[in-house]
Image (cartoon, rainbow, N blue to C red):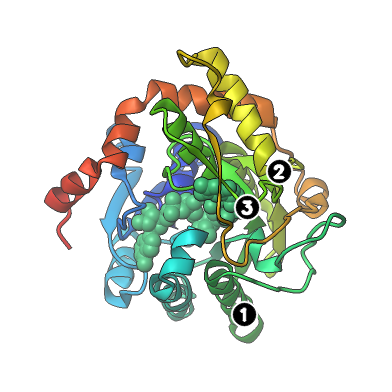
Amino acid sequence: MKVLLVTGGAGFIGSNFIRYLLEESGYAGKVVNLDKLTYAGNLENLAGIAERFPGRYAFVRADIADGEAVEAAILTHGVDAICHLAAESHVDRSIAAPDDFIQSNVVGTFCLLELARKHRERIRRFHHVSTDEVFGSLGPEGQFREDTPYHPNSPYSASKAASDHLVRAYHHTYGLPVTVSNCSNNYGPYQFPEKLIPLLIANALEGKPLPIYGDGKNVRDWLYVRDHARALWTILQKGRVGETYNIGGRCEKTNLEVLEALCAILDKRAPRPGGSYRELKTFVPDRPGHDRRYAMDCVKLEVELEWLPEESFESGLDKTVQWYLSNREWARRVQNGEYREWIRRQYPL
Ligand code: NAD
Ligand code: TYD
Protein backbone atom coordinates (compact mmCIF):
# COMPACT_ATOMS: atom_id res chain seq x y z
CA MET A 1 0.00 0.00 0.00
CA LYS A 2 1.99 2.95 -1.30
CA VAL A 3 -0.72 5.41 -2.31
CA LEU A 4 -3.92 5.39 -0.28
CA LEU A 5 -6.98 7.23 -1.59
CA VAL A 6 -9.04 8.48 1.35
CA THR A 7 -12.51 9.65 0.36
CA GLY A 8 -14.19 12.16 2.65
CA GLY A 9 -10.83 13.13 4.15
CA ALA A 10 -11.93 16.71 4.86
CA GLY A 11 -14.71 15.55 7.18
CA PHE A 12 -14.56 14.74 10.88
CA ILE A 13 -13.34 11.13 10.87
CA GLY A 14 -11.50 11.40 7.55
CA SER A 15 -9.35 14.32 8.70
CA ASN A 16 -8.57 12.63 12.03
CA PHE A 17 -7.70 9.45 10.11
CA ILE A 18 -5.34 11.31 7.74
CA ARG A 19 -3.68 13.06 10.67
CA TYR A 20 -3.26 9.72 12.45
CA LEU A 21 -1.86 8.05 9.31
CA LEU A 22 0.74 10.71 8.63
CA GLU A 23 1.60 11.74 12.17
CA GLU A 24 1.43 8.54 14.17
CA SER A 25 0.82 5.27 12.36
CA GLY A 26 4.21 4.67 10.81
CA TYR A 27 2.65 4.52 7.31
CA ALA A 28 5.39 5.59 4.89
CA GLY A 29 3.31 6.07 1.75
CA LYS A 30 1.24 8.87 0.29
CA VAL A 31 -2.33 9.93 1.09
CA VAL A 32 -4.63 11.33 -1.58
CA ASN A 33 -7.60 13.04 0.04
CA LEU A 34 -10.57 13.13 -2.34
CA ASP A 35 -13.48 15.16 -1.07
CA LYS A 36 -16.37 17.09 -2.58
CA LEU A 37 -16.25 19.64 0.24
CA THR A 38 -19.94 19.60 1.11
CA TYR A 39 -21.05 21.67 4.11
CA ALA A 40 -19.32 18.99 6.26
CA GLY A 41 -15.97 19.13 4.46
CA ASN A 42 -13.51 21.62 5.90
CA LEU A 43 -9.89 21.78 4.79
CA GLU A 44 -9.04 23.73 7.93
CA ASN A 45 -9.28 20.33 9.63
CA LEU A 46 -6.02 19.50 7.83
CA ALA A 47 -4.28 22.86 8.16
CA GLY A 48 -0.49 22.48 7.93
CA ILE A 49 -0.54 18.84 6.79
CA ALA A 50 0.54 19.47 3.17
CA GLU A 51 3.47 21.63 4.38
CA ARG A 52 4.57 19.20 7.07
CA PHE A 53 4.45 16.16 4.80
CA PRO A 54 5.69 17.38 1.41
CA GLY A 55 5.11 14.85 -1.37
CA ARG A 56 3.06 12.62 0.94
CA TYR A 57 -0.28 14.40 0.89
CA ALA A 58 -2.44 15.60 -2.00
CA PHE A 59 -5.94 17.01 -2.10
CA VAL A 60 -8.42 16.52 -4.96
CA ARG A 61 -11.78 18.24 -4.90
CA ALA A 62 -14.21 15.81 -6.54
CA ASP A 63 -17.52 14.05 -6.07
CA ILE A 64 -17.14 10.29 -5.62
CA ALA A 65 -20.01 9.90 -8.10
CA ASP A 66 -17.95 11.71 -10.78
CA GLY A 67 -16.27 8.68 -12.36
CA GLU A 68 -13.99 10.66 -14.67
CA ALA A 69 -12.61 12.87 -11.92
CA VAL A 70 -12.02 9.96 -9.53
CA GLU A 71 -10.42 7.86 -12.28
CA ALA A 72 -8.09 10.75 -13.12
CA ALA A 73 -7.06 10.96 -9.46
CA ILE A 74 -6.43 7.20 -9.30
CA LEU A 75 -4.25 7.25 -12.43
CA THR A 76 -2.42 10.53 -11.78
CA HIS A 77 -1.39 9.56 -8.26
CA GLY A 78 -0.96 5.81 -8.82
CA VAL A 79 -3.53 4.87 -6.16
CA ASP A 80 -3.23 1.25 -5.01
CA ALA A 81 -5.70 1.19 -2.06
CA ILE A 82 -8.90 2.99 -1.08
CA CYS A 83 -10.33 3.83 2.32
CA HIS A 84 -13.85 5.05 1.67
CA LEU A 85 -15.35 7.45 4.22
CA ALA A 86 -17.15 10.01 2.02
CA ALA A 87 -20.83 10.12 2.89
CA GLU A 88 -23.66 12.27 4.06
CA SER A 89 -23.57 11.42 7.74
CA HIS A 90 -26.25 13.20 9.79
CA VAL A 91 -29.46 11.33 10.64
CA ASP A 92 -31.57 14.48 11.18
CA ARG A 93 -30.59 15.84 7.77
CA SER A 94 -31.48 12.49 6.18
CA ILE A 95 -34.95 12.74 7.71
CA ALA A 96 -35.42 16.30 6.43
CA ALA A 97 -33.96 15.70 2.93
CA PRO A 98 -32.84 12.17 1.99
CA ASP A 99 -31.87 12.87 -1.65
CA ASP A 100 -28.16 13.62 -1.10
CA PHE A 101 -27.88 10.50 1.08
CA ILE A 102 -28.98 8.25 -1.75
CA GLN A 103 -26.80 10.07 -4.27
CA SER A 104 -23.56 10.17 -2.26
CA ASN A 105 -23.86 7.11 -0.05
CA VAL A 106 -25.43 4.66 -2.51
CA VAL A 107 -24.69 5.94 -6.04
CA GLY A 108 -21.33 7.38 -4.97
CA THR A 109 -20.19 4.09 -3.42
CA PHE A 110 -21.39 2.19 -6.50
CA CYS A 111 -19.30 4.49 -8.75
CA LEU A 112 -16.20 3.94 -6.61
CA LEU A 113 -16.72 0.17 -6.68
CA GLU A 114 -17.03 0.25 -10.46
CA LEU A 115 -13.69 2.06 -10.70
CA ALA A 116 -12.08 -0.36 -8.25
CA ARG A 117 -13.35 -3.19 -10.47
CA LYS A 118 -12.08 -1.53 -13.63
CA HIS A 119 -8.64 -0.95 -12.08
CA ARG A 120 -8.49 -4.18 -10.12
CA GLU A 121 -4.92 -4.78 -11.30
CA ARG A 122 -3.73 -1.80 -9.29
CA ILE A 123 -6.31 -1.41 -6.45
CA ARG A 124 -5.28 -4.02 -3.91
CA ARG A 125 -7.66 -3.09 -1.11
CA PHE A 126 -11.01 -1.34 -0.82
CA HIS A 127 -11.97 -0.57 2.77
CA HIS A 128 -15.52 0.65 3.32
CA VAL A 129 -16.29 2.65 6.46
CA SER A 130 -19.79 2.10 7.81
CA THR A 131 -21.89 2.47 10.93
CA ASP A 132 -23.55 0.39 13.64
CA GLU A 133 -26.85 2.08 12.69
CA VAL A 134 -27.34 -0.41 9.82
CA PHE A 135 -28.28 -3.04 12.43
CA GLY A 136 -31.30 -1.11 13.69
CA SER A 137 -32.37 -0.61 17.28
CA LEU A 138 -31.79 -2.82 20.34
CA GLY A 139 -33.94 -3.33 23.44
CA PRO A 140 -32.34 -3.20 26.89
CA GLU A 141 -30.29 -6.38 26.29
CA GLY A 142 -27.87 -7.66 23.64
CA GLN A 143 -25.23 -6.31 21.28
CA PHE A 144 -24.78 -6.11 17.52
CA ARG A 145 -22.42 -8.72 16.10
CA GLU A 146 -20.92 -8.86 12.62
CA ASP A 147 -23.57 -11.43 11.65
CA THR A 148 -26.56 -9.53 13.09
CA PRO A 149 -29.14 -9.09 10.30
CA TYR A 150 -29.42 -5.57 8.91
CA HIS A 151 -32.49 -3.58 9.95
CA PRO A 152 -31.83 0.09 9.12
CA ASN A 153 -34.47 2.54 10.32
CA SER A 154 -33.50 6.01 9.05
CA PRO A 155 -32.82 7.19 5.49
CA TYR A 156 -29.17 7.64 6.59
CA SER A 157 -28.77 4.10 7.93
CA ALA A 158 -30.70 2.65 4.97
CA SER A 159 -28.32 4.40 2.56
CA LYS A 160 -25.29 3.09 4.47
CA ALA A 161 -26.80 -0.41 4.55
CA ALA A 162 -27.31 -0.27 0.78
CA SER A 163 -23.67 0.72 0.28
CA ASP A 164 -22.47 -2.07 2.61
CA HIS A 165 -24.46 -4.59 0.59
CA LEU A 166 -22.97 -3.32 -2.68
CA VAL A 167 -19.45 -3.63 -1.27
CA ARG A 168 -20.14 -7.17 -0.10
CA ALA A 169 -21.68 -8.09 -3.46
CA TYR A 170 -18.63 -6.78 -5.36
CA HIS A 171 -16.46 -9.07 -3.29
CA HIS A 172 -18.77 -12.07 -3.72
CA THR A 173 -19.37 -11.56 -7.45
CA TYR A 174 -16.16 -10.01 -8.76
CA GLY A 175 -13.69 -11.01 -6.07
CA LEU A 176 -12.89 -7.39 -5.21
CA PRO A 177 -10.49 -7.28 -2.21
CA VAL A 178 -12.83 -5.51 0.19
CA THR A 179 -13.08 -5.11 3.96
CA VAL A 180 -15.92 -3.38 5.82
CA SER A 181 -16.08 -1.84 9.28
CA ASN A 182 -19.19 -0.84 11.23
CA CYS A 183 -18.39 1.66 13.95
CA SER A 184 -20.37 3.20 16.80
CA ASN A 185 -20.76 6.96 17.54
CA ASN A 186 -17.51 8.91 17.32
CA TYR A 187 -16.58 12.10 19.12
CA GLY A 188 -13.44 14.25 19.28
CA PRO A 189 -11.74 17.21 17.58
CA TYR A 190 -13.04 18.65 14.28
CA GLN A 191 -16.58 17.24 14.58
CA PHE A 192 -19.20 19.40 12.89
CA PRO A 193 -21.41 20.99 15.56
CA GLU A 194 -24.62 19.36 14.36
CA LYS A 195 -23.86 16.05 16.13
CA LEU A 196 -24.73 15.67 19.80
CA ILE A 197 -21.40 16.23 21.57
CA PRO A 198 -20.00 19.21 19.61
CA LEU A 199 -23.50 20.74 19.48
CA LEU A 200 -23.82 20.58 23.26
CA ILE A 201 -20.33 22.07 23.73
CA ALA A 202 -20.97 24.90 21.24
CA ASN A 203 -24.38 25.75 22.69
CA ALA A 204 -23.12 25.59 26.27
CA LEU A 205 -20.30 28.02 25.55
CA GLU A 206 -22.79 30.42 24.00
CA GLY A 207 -25.27 30.06 26.86
CA LYS A 208 -27.85 28.53 24.52
CA PRO A 209 -30.29 25.68 25.41
CA LEU A 210 -28.87 22.13 25.36
CA PRO A 211 -31.49 20.17 23.36
CA ILE A 212 -32.29 16.62 24.42
CA TYR A 213 -34.61 14.66 22.14
CA GLY A 214 -37.53 12.83 23.77
CA ASP A 215 -36.80 11.46 27.25
CA GLY A 216 -33.00 11.50 26.77
CA LYS A 217 -32.75 7.78 27.57
CA ASN A 218 -31.67 6.64 24.09
CA VAL A 219 -28.35 4.82 24.34
CA ARG A 220 -25.33 5.13 22.06
CA ASP A 221 -21.91 3.47 22.25
CA TRP A 222 -19.20 6.16 22.15
CA LEU A 223 -15.69 5.92 20.70
CA TYR A 224 -12.97 8.59 20.65
CA VAL A 225 -12.19 9.33 17.01
CA ARG A 226 -8.45 8.57 17.26
CA ASP A 227 -9.34 5.04 18.39
CA HIS A 228 -11.50 4.69 15.27
CA ALA A 229 -8.56 5.90 13.16
CA ARG A 230 -6.32 3.28 14.82
CA ALA A 231 -8.91 0.61 14.10
CA LEU A 232 -9.14 1.56 10.42
CA TRP A 233 -5.37 1.44 10.08
CA THR A 234 -5.30 -1.94 11.86
CA ILE A 235 -7.93 -3.36 9.50
CA LEU A 236 -6.17 -1.96 6.43
CA GLN A 237 -2.98 -3.69 7.52
CA LYS A 238 -4.22 -6.94 9.02
CA GLY A 239 -7.92 -7.35 8.16
CA ARG A 240 -8.93 -10.41 6.17
CA VAL A 241 -10.33 -9.71 2.71
CA GLY A 242 -14.09 -10.26 2.51
CA GLU A 243 -14.57 -9.78 6.28
CA THR A 244 -16.47 -7.15 8.23
CA TYR A 245 -15.36 -5.85 11.63
CA ASN A 246 -17.38 -4.13 14.35
CA ILE A 247 -15.67 -1.19 16.05
CA GLY A 248 -16.89 0.28 19.32
CA GLY A 249 -15.84 1.71 22.64
CA ARG A 250 -17.63 -0.68 25.07
CA CYS A 251 -19.04 2.58 26.34
CA GLU A 252 -22.83 2.74 26.43
CA LYS A 253 -24.31 6.02 27.62
CA THR A 254 -27.77 7.54 27.58
CA ASN A 255 -27.89 10.99 26.04
CA LEU A 256 -28.66 12.39 29.50
CA GLU A 257 -25.49 10.75 30.84
CA VAL A 258 -23.49 12.32 28.01
CA LEU A 259 -24.95 15.72 28.85
CA GLU A 260 -24.19 15.27 32.57
CA ALA A 261 -20.58 14.25 31.90
CA LEU A 262 -20.04 17.17 29.51
CA CYS A 263 -21.54 19.72 31.90
CA ALA A 264 -19.33 18.44 34.74
CA ILE A 265 -16.20 18.96 32.61
CA LEU A 266 -17.35 22.36 31.34
CA ASP A 267 -18.24 23.49 34.86
CA LYS A 268 -14.65 22.71 35.85
CA ARG A 269 -12.80 23.98 32.76
CA ALA A 270 -14.90 27.00 31.78
CA PRO A 271 -17.20 27.84 34.71
CA ARG A 272 -20.39 29.62 33.75
CA PRO A 273 -21.19 32.73 35.72
CA GLY A 274 -24.54 32.19 37.36
CA GLY A 275 -24.66 28.40 37.70
CA SER A 276 -23.98 25.01 36.17
CA TYR A 277 -24.30 24.35 32.44
CA ARG A 278 -26.87 21.69 33.45
CA GLU A 279 -29.40 24.46 33.87
CA LEU A 280 -29.38 24.89 30.07
CA LYS A 281 -30.75 21.34 29.55
CA THR A 282 -33.95 21.51 27.47
CA PHE A 283 -36.13 18.60 26.43
CA VAL A 284 -37.32 18.97 22.81
CA PRO A 285 -39.64 16.82 20.65
CA ASP A 286 -38.20 13.42 19.76
CA ARG A 287 -36.55 12.57 16.41
CA PRO A 288 -39.01 10.62 14.21
CA GLY A 289 -38.15 6.89 14.28
CA HIS A 290 -35.42 7.52 16.88
CA ASP A 291 -33.43 4.30 17.47
CA ARG A 292 -33.52 3.42 21.16
CA ARG A 293 -30.23 1.67 21.78
CA TYR A 294 -27.02 0.70 19.96
CA ALA A 295 -24.36 -1.59 21.47
CA MET A 296 -21.43 -3.31 19.79
CA ASP A 297 -19.76 -6.67 20.23
CA CYS A 298 -16.20 -5.99 19.01
CA VAL A 299 -14.59 -9.26 20.11
CA LYS A 300 -13.60 -10.14 16.52
CA LEU A 301 -11.52 -6.97 16.12
CA GLU A 302 -10.15 -7.24 19.64
CA VAL A 303 -9.09 -10.89 19.42
CA GLU A 304 -8.27 -11.35 15.74
CA LEU A 305 -6.56 -8.05 15.08
CA GLU A 306 -5.57 -7.16 18.65
CA TRP A 307 -7.15 -3.71 18.67
CA LEU A 308 -8.47 -2.13 21.85
CA PRO A 309 -9.63 1.43 22.48
CA GLU A 310 -7.00 3.48 24.31
CA GLU A 311 -9.24 6.31 25.45
CA SER A 312 -11.87 6.06 28.21
CA PHE A 313 -15.05 8.13 27.87
CA GLU A 314 -13.89 10.42 30.66
CA SER A 315 -10.42 11.06 29.19
CA GLY A 316 -11.72 11.32 25.61
CA LEU A 317 -14.46 13.74 26.57
CA ASP A 318 -12.05 15.87 28.57
CA LYS A 319 -9.66 16.04 25.59
CA THR A 320 -12.58 16.92 23.32
CA VAL A 321 -13.78 19.75 25.56
CA GLN A 322 -10.23 21.08 25.86
CA TRP A 323 -9.85 20.98 22.08
CA TYR A 324 -13.06 22.96 21.51
CA LEU A 325 -12.03 25.46 24.19
CA SER A 326 -8.63 25.96 22.53
CA ASN A 327 -10.09 26.14 19.02
CA ARG A 328 -12.96 28.56 19.37
CA GLU A 329 -11.91 30.28 16.12
CA TRP A 330 -12.40 27.00 14.21
CA ALA A 331 -15.84 26.61 15.78
CA ARG A 332 -16.72 30.26 15.10
CA ARG A 333 -15.81 30.00 11.42
CA VAL A 334 -17.77 26.75 11.08
CA GLN A 335 -20.81 28.16 12.82
CA ASN A 336 -20.98 31.41 10.86
CA GLY A 337 -20.16 29.70 7.55
CA GLU A 338 -16.90 31.61 6.90
CA TYR A 339 -15.07 28.39 6.03
CA ARG A 340 -17.39 27.98 3.02
CA GLU A 341 -16.28 31.31 1.56
CA TRP A 342 -12.67 30.23 1.64
CA ILE A 343 -13.49 26.91 -0.05
CA ARG A 344 -15.50 28.65 -2.78
CA ARG A 345 -12.54 30.92 -3.54
CA GLN A 346 -9.86 28.20 -3.44
CA TYR A 347 -11.72 25.32 -5.04
CA PRO A 348 -14.47 26.42 -7.41
CA LEU A 349 -16.29 23.35 -8.69
P1 NAD B 1 -18.66 14.04 7.97
O1 NAD B 1 -20.03 14.44 7.55
O2 NAD B 1 -17.95 14.84 9.02
O3 NAD B 1 -17.69 14.05 6.68
C1 NAD B 1 -18.06 13.51 5.45
C2 NAD B 1 -17.08 13.99 4.40
O4 NAD B 1 -17.45 13.38 3.15
C3 NAD B 1 -17.10 15.50 4.18
O5 NAD B 1 -15.78 16.00 4.11
C4 NAD B 1 -17.81 15.67 2.86
O6 NAD B 1 -17.40 16.83 2.13
C5 NAD B 1 -17.45 14.38 2.14
N1 NAD B 1 -18.43 14.00 1.11
C6 NAD B 1 -19.78 13.87 1.27
N2 NAD B 1 -20.34 13.50 0.10
C7 NAD B 1 -19.32 13.38 -0.80
C8 NAD B 1 -19.27 13.02 -2.18
N3 NAD B 1 -20.37 12.74 -2.88
N4 NAD B 1 -18.06 12.97 -2.78
C9 NAD B 1 -16.92 13.28 -2.10
N5 NAD B 1 -16.92 13.66 -0.80
C10 NAD B 1 -18.11 13.70 -0.16
O7 NAD B 1 -18.77 12.52 8.34
P2 NAD B 1 -17.95 11.68 9.43
O8 NAD B 1 -18.64 11.77 10.73
O9 NAD B 1 -16.52 12.02 9.33
O10 NAD B 1 -18.18 10.19 8.86
C11 NAD B 1 -17.28 9.62 7.91
C12 NAD B 1 -17.74 8.23 7.57
O11 NAD B 1 -17.80 7.45 8.74
C13 NAD B 1 -19.14 8.16 6.94
O12 NAD B 1 -19.11 7.17 5.94
C14 NAD B 1 -20.03 7.75 8.09
O13 NAD B 1 -21.16 7.05 7.63
C15 NAD B 1 -19.10 6.87 8.88
N6 NAD B 1 -19.37 6.78 10.33
C16 NAD B 1 -19.49 7.92 11.08
C17 NAD B 1 -19.70 7.80 12.46
C18 NAD B 1 -19.79 9.02 13.35
O14 NAD B 1 -20.06 8.88 14.54
N7 NAD B 1 -19.58 10.22 12.85
C19 NAD B 1 -19.77 6.53 13.05
C20 NAD B 1 -19.63 5.39 12.24
C21 NAD B 1 -19.42 5.53 10.88
P1 TYD C 1 -26.19 12.21 16.72
O1 TYD C 1 -24.95 12.86 17.24
O2 TYD C 1 -26.99 12.93 15.70
O3 TYD C 1 -25.74 10.76 16.21
P2 TYD C 1 -26.68 9.50 15.74
O4 TYD C 1 -28.07 9.97 15.56
O5 TYD C 1 -26.03 9.12 14.44
O6 TYD C 1 -26.53 8.47 16.82
O7 TYD C 1 -27.14 11.90 17.96
C1 TYD C 1 -26.69 11.11 19.04
C2 TYD C 1 -27.85 10.94 20.00
O8 TYD C 1 -28.19 12.22 20.56
C3 TYD C 1 -29.13 10.46 19.32
O9 TYD C 1 -29.83 9.59 20.24
C4 TYD C 1 -29.94 11.72 19.10
C5 TYD C 1 -29.54 12.58 20.28
N1 TYD C 1 -29.53 14.04 20.07
C6 TYD C 1 -30.17 14.88 20.99
O10 TYD C 1 -30.78 14.44 21.98
N2 TYD C 1 -30.10 16.24 20.79
C7 TYD C 1 -29.47 16.78 19.70
O11 TYD C 1 -29.48 18.03 19.55
C8 TYD C 1 -28.81 15.90 18.78
C9 TYD C 1 -28.10 16.46 17.57
C10 TYD C 1 -28.86 14.54 19.00
Position in image of residue 131 (x %, y %): 61, 59
- Whether residue 3 appears in this view of the structure is no
Q: Residue furthest right?
A: 141
From the image, tell me which residue sits under label 2.
254
Secondary structure beneath disc 1? loop
Q: Is mark 3 within 8 Å of ligand 2?
A: yes
Q: CA distance from mark 2 to mark 1?
A: 41 Å
Q: Is mark 1 within 8 Å of ligand 1?
A: no
- Quadrant location of residue 86? bottom left
From the image, tell me which residue sits under label 3.
214
The reply, left or right, for residue 206 in relation to residue 212 is: left
Q: Nearer the viewer, mark 2 or mark 1?
A: 2
Q: Residue furthest left?
A: 345
Q: Quadrant of the C terminus?
A: bottom left
Mark 1: few/some/many CA within 10 Å (<14, 14-19, 20+): some
Is residue 162 placed above or below 38 in the rendered structure?
A: below
From the image, tell me which residue sits under label 1.
175
Mark 2: few/some/many CA within 10 Å (<14, 14-19, 20+): some
| Mark toward the start of the polypeptide (3 vs 2) | 3
Q: Amino acid at mark 1?
A: Gly
Is residue 23 placed above or below 93 in the rendered structure?
A: above
In percent of the image, x 31 and y 58: which residue is there? 38
Q: Amino acid at mark 2?
A: Thr
| Mark toward the start of the polypeptide (3 vs 1) | 1
Q: CB atoms at circles 2 and 1 under 8 Å apart?
A: no
In percent of the image, x 76 and y 53: which residue is there? 296
As rendered, which of 331 and 59 lies closer to the eye?
331
Is residue 182 placed above or below 213 in the rendered structure?
A: below
Q: Nearer the viewer, mark 3 or mark 2?
A: 3
Position in image of residue 23 (x %, y %): 46, 32
Q: CA distance from mark 3 to mark 2?
A: 12 Å
